[in-house]
Image (cartoon, rainbow, N blue to C red):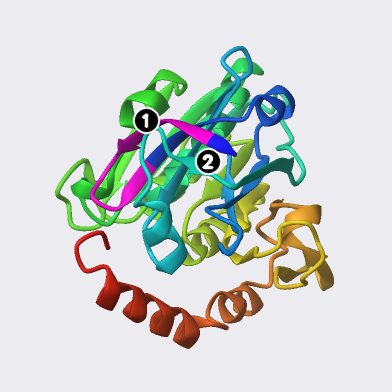
Amino acid sequence: MYPILLRQDLTTNIHLFKVAAPAVAKKAQTGHFVVVRIDEKGERIPLTIADWDEEEGSVTIIFMQVGTSTARLATLGTGDTLANFVGPLGLPSHIEKFGTVVCVGGGVGVAPIFPVARALKHAGNKVITIMGARHQELLFWEDRLRSVSDHLIVTTDDGSYGRKGVVTVPLKELLEGDKKINRVTAIGPGVMMKFCAKTTLPFGVKTIVSLNSIMVDGTGMCGACRVGIGGVTKFACIDGPEFDGHKVDWNLLATRERMYIEEEKLSFDQWLAKHPVSA
């Protein structure tokens, strides 16, 4: 069992768990993910590691409450335990001194973009970070991202905080600017990453995206996370989760993300009927 050392509610539906997992913390690297199960009957939930502390033996995960399993996960708090906390899994991020890099985090994608920005900064890069959300209430970790960025741009779709608009607008402005952008990493909803990649393509700037969202098993056995990368079938869990955004078959990815939408809705509706307060 893995004790939850700390629970924080970052927004109404976005929650942070710091979990005691010394073996995972010892091996964790930027870009790795873990698979969480609440109990022996629980669904496998792949979550990118948001932070870790090898000395404390803790790993921090952040998740958004969107369906049955994450709603169940959100009922836990400090002092509760998780049945499984498997990791670190996947391939670590490719970190080196590229020059000037842009890190784009959308929604809950702010959590996994933080360690990427931090690692790139430690490697000697100039880090420009763009973080965005639909509205101000969904923003979190602005202070953390600011601490590892040379420049931070905040956007909200409705203009309730920071710049009004989507993250691709300042991204394009940076690409068109006087300073050369050497690399872009974008993590967030599939549609956001898709349009970040489309924005950078004409400028020839390599763009890395994370395809964590379509994983299930997390070890390459179930095949649910098959994705087309440059015309070749890859598995997001063992070949990724990070890939070249210019090579991703975004239409196939969108189809996979919606494969079980009806079953997910039915399951969540049943959960809401039984747990109206906690959900």
Residue at the spot x=59%, y=42% of the render?
A: 184
Q: Residue at x 42, y 79 (%)?
A: 267
Quarter of the image for the N terminus: give it: top right
Membership of 10 in magenta stretch? yes
The CA distance from mark 2 to mark 1 is: 16 Å
Measuring from the top left, give residue 97's x and y in whole percent.
Answer: 70, 23
Q: From the image, which quarter does the C terminus lie in? A: bottom left
Which label's residue is closer to the chain start, 2 or 1?
2
Secondary structure beneath label 1: strand
Q: Residues within 10 Å of mark 2 (few under 14, many from 20)?
A: many
Residue that sits furthest to the right in the current view:
232
* Other residues around mark 1 within 10 Å, as few (<14) / some (14–19) / many (≥20): some
Across and down, in percent, residue 170 comes to 38, 46
Which amino acid, mark 2?
Pro
**x, y percent for residue 73:** 43, 53
**Closer to us: 47 or 103:** 47
Task: Note whether 11 is above or below 147 in the view shown.
Answer: below
Identify the residue at horizontal 43%, vertical 39% (top origin): 80
Kindly identify which residue carries mark 1. 152
The magenta stretch spans which residues? Answer: 3-15
Q: Nearer the viewer, mark 2 or mark 1?
A: 2
Residue at figure coordinates x 21%, y 41% from the top left: 162
Can residue 113 be seen here? Answer: yes
User: Does the magenta segment cover residue 102?
Assistant: no
In-front residue for pair 256/179: 256
Q: Return the mark for residue 112.
A: 2
Magenta span main SS = strand
| Element class at badge 2 | helix
Residue 68 placement: quadrant: bottom left
Query: Horizontally, is 66 left or right of 56 in the view?
Result: left
Q: For this view, does 227 lie left or right of residue 250?
A: right
Q: Is residue 166 left or right of residue 243?
A: left
